[in-house]
Amino acid sequence: MRKLALNDEILLKVDKAARYIGGEVNSVMKDKEKVDIRFTMCFPDVYEIGMSNLGMMILYDMFNKRDDVWCERLFSPWTDMDRLLREENVPLFALESQDPIMNFDFLGITLGYEMCYTNVLQILDLGQIPLLSSERGEEFPIVIGGGACAYNPEPLAAFFDMFYIGEGETVFDDVFDAYKKNKAAGGSKEDFLLMAAQIPGIYVPAFYDVTYHEDGTIASFIPNRKGVPGRIEKQVVIDMENGYRAIEAPVVPYIKATQDRVTLEIQRGCIRGCRFCQAGMIYRPTRERNVETLKASAKQMLKNTGHEEISLSSLSSSDYSELKELVTFLIDEFQGNAVNISLPSLRIDAFALDVMSKVQDVKKSSLTFAPEAGSQRLRDVINKGLTEEIILHGAGEAFRGGWNRVKLYFMLGLPTETEEDMKGIAHLAEKIAEEYYEIPKDQRNGKVQIVVSTSFFVPKPFTPFQWASMFTEEEFIEKAKIVKSEIRDQLNQRSIKYSWHEPDVTVLEGFLARGDRRASEVIQKAYQKGAMYDAWSEHFRYDIWKEAFAESGVDIHFYTTRERSPEEILPWDFIDAGVTKEFLLREWKQAKNGVVTPNCRSKCSGCGVRRYGGGVCHEGKN
């Protein structure tokens, strides 16, 4: 029987002790004496959120299929456990074996969003692993980062030994084989990192030097070792039938996770080309999974977990070409077994509404639209591909189908935005409310509720808006006030509820998203002053970050409010993400002119990913 790292006395002092004990259904146990590589897979946020991360679960399943690797899980301890671990001097441990993570070969950290960066340092600190990679000797694990934020790894470069750029199913086996080969030869950590740096998709920050111009922009970014590539190519699974690693038996949490269901990934990528969306660019090309494989996978995962809900995961589910067949199968196969089917990222059309009426309790749920901008002009600028006519028609169909609650998501601070665009948010909400009252009174389902939410725009790497400027915290607040005031002037303002995202968090996210290596010092100082769980509003302390900026001598406005020149070397320019810089620049110019680019199935826009030889770029071609 396993011995827990924490005694009952400690576990009884914390909220949700099940976060720390492991032993869940389908978790993998191995004999640590019979494996060559021990890997801790970490998500730097609380257990309930990390257990909902599909990418982490895919790699956990894939690594453990190797007889020579034992992959275990790790999540950020919540604040109560964080305090107790420090007080009791208990080193942070992996869930399965309960062994300290400092004793493992690898510590892999999934970087899903920028606001988890101080939690990365929390993991290292509680694991009694030096924060800086330059200070970690041979006895410490190789710290490797991956995920969406690894497409600009520079703000975290000081803390990681290596990064994996792209989709994990491709070259991790090569990384493990190189590690074993180096270990057998008696090689050092640097010897292994040199081997790893020559594997496609692997970036070792220590093997590159950065110089800067007097104005603070990057002057050069070059390798400092022979044989290390000047450009890192993202790794992509093109064959979604043979290259994709489907999860057969997902781990079932003891406590309710944020996504407490089976997740079935139906495709990767998105054909839409929204100019603000990083995921839509870095996950190109769009690749679909075979519908028959998905049917079999759904049956197997539900059987192996006992979950009562299955979610179809995709950036844009409506664009999956076999969606109707798949959903019809799931309804026929499982609905009699009280299995709910969740369909996020749907475009609201007749088919979507028909499906949702069959699989969900429509009288209690709300429908979600994401117009992103209040005017058609600005929706064209961001290439949203959604007209007011489509939005109003979809809302009208939903209201006639029994819904009376609609959520609307918008962004403020988008490039070229005017006051009229901001006020357009209120006007669109009013038009949707009016659409409801077009229905005869005896056919309505109570009062209509329009929930309007605005986030603030953050330019992200590898998007056409990566050169754009951001606004200040004060300017964001003024924009929200304009929307709020205009909503109050609408006839149906009592039916419209408005909220907006925290502007200070947005500004910091903008700094972390486009930061360079100089950001590492700010992150470290903020953490040492107490910053942690920055994605959680109740724990976010902007005053701490302001102190860290002041002590580091780093001007946040250099990274946020400054528009970049097309000639400037960007911190992530050494990464080949598939989409070319020429395409992104062309889209940046198209945005400024309000010109719409067709989706990938309508017309190829020449973004550069056709060279991968698969996906939507080659549909119907031999």
Image (cartoon, rainbow, N blue to C red):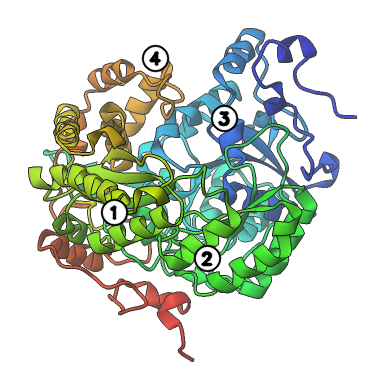
Q: How far apart are marks 2 and 4 (CA)?
A: 42 Å
User: Mark 4 and mark 1: span between their CA atoms?
Assistant: 56 Å
Q: Which of marks 4 and 1 is in front?
A: 1
Mark positioned earlier in the residue sequence (2 or 4): 2
Q: Which amino acid type corresponds to the residue marked 3 in the rendered image?
A: Val
Contact? badges 3 and 1 (CB < 8 Å): no
Circle 2 residue: 267
Q: How far separated are the C-alphas under marks 3 and 2?
A: 27 Å
Check the picture and name the quadrant holding the N terminus. top right
- Graded by Cα atoms within 10 Å as few (under 14), some (14 to 19) or many (20 or more), the crowding at tag 2 reads many
Type of the residue with mark 2 = Gln
User: Relative to 322, is 92 above or below?
Assistant: above
Label 4 with label 3: CB-CB less than 8 Å: no
> Which amino acid does the dot numbered 1 rest on?
Glu
Q: Which residue is drawn at 64% across and 17% down?
A: 15
Q: Which of 622 and 307 is in front in this view?
A: 307
> Can I make out residue 66 in this image?
no
Label ID, residue 46: 3
**Relative to residue 256, is residue 581 drawn left or right?**
left
Give the numbered dot on residue 529.
Answer: 4
Q: Residues within 10 Å of mark 4 (few under 14, many from 20)?
A: some
Q: In this orientation, which residue lies closer to the viewer: 98 or 347? A: 347
Q: Quadrant of residue 509?
A: top left
**From mark 3 to mark 1, how far is it between C-alphas?**
45 Å
Q: Is residue 346 above or below residue 562?
A: below
C-alpha gap between disc 4 and disc 3: 20 Å
- How far apart marks 2 and 1 lie (CA) works out to 38 Å
Residue 263 in the image: state x and y as whole percent.
62, 53
The numbered mark, 2 or 1, whose residue comes first in the sequence reads 2
Question: Picture quarter containing residue 213?
Answer: top left
Label 1 sits on residue: 438
